[in-house]
Amino acid sequence: MTLPSDLDELSAEALKELVIQLLGETAELKQTIAKLRAEIARLKGLKEAPAIKPSGMDKATDPPQPVPREKRSGHGKVRPRVCIEDRVLPIAAPPGSRFKGYKSSRCAAPASPKNG
């Protein structure tokens, strides 16, 4: 493509044709650049550009339809799976030891099944 020496001499119709031709060339060059960038990324082993999905904001403008819920049955009182009981374990202190105070601890015994 050769540009005329003086653009002021061109008519309006010729200027429009020139602009349309330049816009077409620009679009072709942008497509070529995009293809080359994709090929460079492929050769370098880079990941592709992520496919971005539409946001779905159009759906958010409508109020959501109420969903009928099923009635749940009531839950009973929560029972522990093990019985907790306090036991005192008689242990003889080793010779030469000193009393440093009591330390309370709990022992969890398995729950016994009820016979009755």
Image: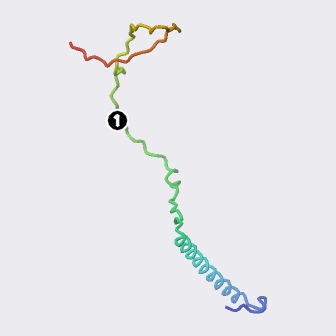
Colour scheme employed for the rendering of this structure: rainbow
Residue placed furthest toward the front: 96
Q: Residue at x 52, y 62 (%)?
A: 50
Does residue 18 appear left or right of residue 107 in this picture?
right
Name the foreground residue: 108 vs 81: 108
Of residues 67 and 32, the one drawn nearer to the viewer in this rendering: 32
Q: Is residue 94 left or right of residue 55?
A: left
Residue 7's spot in the image, x, y percent?
Answer: 76, 88
Residue 63 location, x and y as percent?
49, 46
Please name whichever residue, 52 or 83, is drawn nearer the observer in this view of the structure: 83
- How many C-alpha atoms fall within 10 Å of the one at disc 1: few (<14), some, or many (≥20)? few
The answer to whether residue 26 is above or below residue 91 is below
> Is 34 on the left or on the right of 103, as rendered?
right
Q: Quadrant of residue 15?
A: bottom right
SS label for mark 1: loop
User: Which image quarter is the C terminus in?
Assistant: top left
Split into 4 quadrants, where in the image is the N terminus?
A: bottom right
Relative depth, front residue between 16 and 6: 6
> Looking at the picture, how far across and down is residue 11, in whole percent?
73, 90
What is the x, y in percent for residue 108?
A: 37, 18
Residue shown at 46% from the left, 8% from the top: 95
Q: Residue furthest left?
A: 116
Give the residue pinned by disc 1: 70
Give amino acid for label 1.
Glu
Instruction: Indicate the quadrant where residue 6 lies.
Output: bottom right
Residue at 25 percent across and 17 percent down: it is: 113
Which residue does the image show at 52% across and 56% down from the upper left?
Answer: 55
Counting labels gives 1
